[in-house]
Image (cartoon, coloured by chain):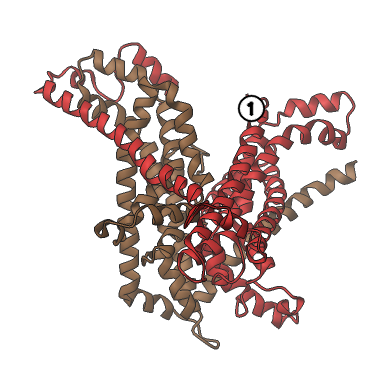
Chain colours: A red, B brown
Amino acid sequence: MSSPDRAETAAAGVVPAVSPTDGLAPPMGSRLGDGLARALQRLLVAAFFVYIVAFLLLPSAEVLVGAFRGEHGLTLRYVRELLTQRYATAFANSVELSLVTALIGGVCGLAIAYLAVSPRSPHWLRTAVTSFSGVAANFAGVPLAFAFVSTLGTMGLLTLWLQRMGFDLYATGFSLFSFSGLAVTYLYFQIPLMVIIISPAVQALRREWREAARNLGATPWQYWRYVGLPILMPSTLAAMVLLFGNAFAAYATPYALTSGNIALVPIEIGNVLSGNVMSSPQLGKALALGMIAVMALAMGAYALLQRRISRWQR
Amino acid sequence: MSALRRLLPGWRVWVLGLAGLYFMVPLLATGGFSLWAGGDRYDFSAYETLLQSSDFWDSLGLSVRLALLTILISLALLVPTVYWVQLRAQRLRPLMEFLAVLPFVVPPIALVEGLASVYTGPQWLVGTPDFLVVAYVILALPYTYRALDVGMRSLDIRTLSEAAQSLGANWPTLMLRAILPNLIGTLVGATLLTLAIVMGEFTFANVLLFNTFAVYINYVGQTSGTEAAALSLLSFVMTWLAMAGILITGRRGQVQLGGAR
């Protein structure tokens, strides 16, 4: 039963999913149960907000304030330390890796989504691509890292197979445990994520727009240049911003792949936290602060783009 | 023009074929690698070793237990809250939306930094793996909230509640017999997604030094490649099962995504 029907039957005075006799059964000891249940509900609602304050807002505030707290009052020392070689490199690496994988992942994901979910493609293909994307976008972290070690590591099956074909992958300068390897691995969850996010926008491209353009004499190129792409552009940008944030926050995948040897912001925070480097806890907070700032910018940009998009999706 | 159009189907097949290759090869290689037993021998020894290892069962058991606790607490806190916002406090909706996005803005590694410095005690909480649940509920919040919000909105909670109450249903009856049965699909979806997220979660557990399933996979990976491959494949199958469950119980085409990067 779809929801509108349900609303109508309910409006007509028939309670769905509960047979009328059940609903009218004399409430046994209802007063007390009723009151208790209401009290419990109020308690849980209150508990939810307390929980959020205690375990989300308070720790976040601690990071934001702690980054400026020195031994003798407020200080900019730790935030300034972000500008030193080591941590500036970490930010540069993180941003670059996130940009590259967001861009490539975005373009590939858009192409796949267009080919798979546009009205002309067969239904089975659409189902197969969207459900596989759902799985692959969630297949990340440590297991993904080892899947790629099995494939493209120094002893990986694909590496060995290429070697037997006379092609030494690692001689080209590629390494799974370097920037390029991380990028290839990230794409395994970035592309499917793009497919999931952009599919609704691709499906919203109306067939009528294409037909109208053709009737007015537009070539396919002109249709894409003046109609298709301008409509898709905000959603594509917004989706890419999400991919950027998704890659920027990734910790498990690079940690498992490189054992924390490549300087990325999340990895550096982990190093400070686990005492792998000699540094103050405030530095960890300063790094986290920088990370939150980048993520806040990304989510802000996403929200702005989203507002433009709503114009085109009903 | 016609030449291009004749080319197009081929182009379509090429792009999708290449993408398919990129996505299938790591899975096949992982499968192959997990069966490798040195030299030219292939067998199930990696799987056998795993199944006999008590660390495997311990870490798996721990992650499952943490996932169940997370699901329980998430639903207990969120179902009443989303219901209440929907029915009586619509003006709080923007606040809820904001709170549900916050876990994205504050990534796990930044949140664990804050949590670790705010909560240094008591030992019975901070010193046990159960402390992870505290963070996992926050991690699952965006997905659980979205699922419940969409689910309840499509139900027309208000009409349903008024109808039930005008027929004499008291509060427990209303919740247990009118609201919850209609939310089963939503609840199962949120549950499976949370399960998938927690089973794969590495950041919190690794930093706080608890031996969950993902931490165990990483540990195994440092010593035995074939066993790590077997575990990765197992992990992929679990993700696949969870997503299949969501597809079957949820709205068609609504594939959700979690976060354990």
Q: Is residue A29 left or right of residue B39?
A: left
| Residue A205 visible (yes or no) | yes
B142 and A92: which is toward the camera: A92
Where is residue B49? Give x, y as percent: 37, 79
Residue beneath the point at 45% across and 42% down: B143
Where is residue B123? Give x, y as percent: 26, 60
Q: Quadrant of residue B88?
A: top left
Residue that numbered label 1 is attached to? A310
Residue B45 lies, with reference to residue B96, above or below; the image says below
Residue beneath the point at 79% across and 27% down: A211
Residue beneath the point at 34% across and 52% down: B133
- Secondary structure under the numbered disc 1 in the rendered image: loop
Q: Is residue B54 left or right of residue A312?
A: left
Q: Look at label 1 and name its amino acid.
A: Ser
For disc 1, the neighbor class at 10 Å (few under 14, some 14 to 19, many from 20) is few
The chain carrying label 1 is: A
Residue A133 lies, with reference to residue A174, above or below; the image says above
Residue A249 lies, with reference to residue A165, above or below; the image says above
Residue lying at the far front in this picture: please name it.
A72
Residue beneath the point at 14% across and 26% down: A33
Where is residue A244? Give x, y as percent: 64, 49
Residue A38 lies, with reference to residue A139, above or below; the image says above
| Screen quadrant of the N terminus of chain B | top right
| Residue A125 visible (yes or no) | no
Residue lying at the far bottom in this picture: please name it.
B39
Q: Is residue B212 left or right of residue B165?
A: right
Where is residue A11? Give x, y as percent: 36, 12
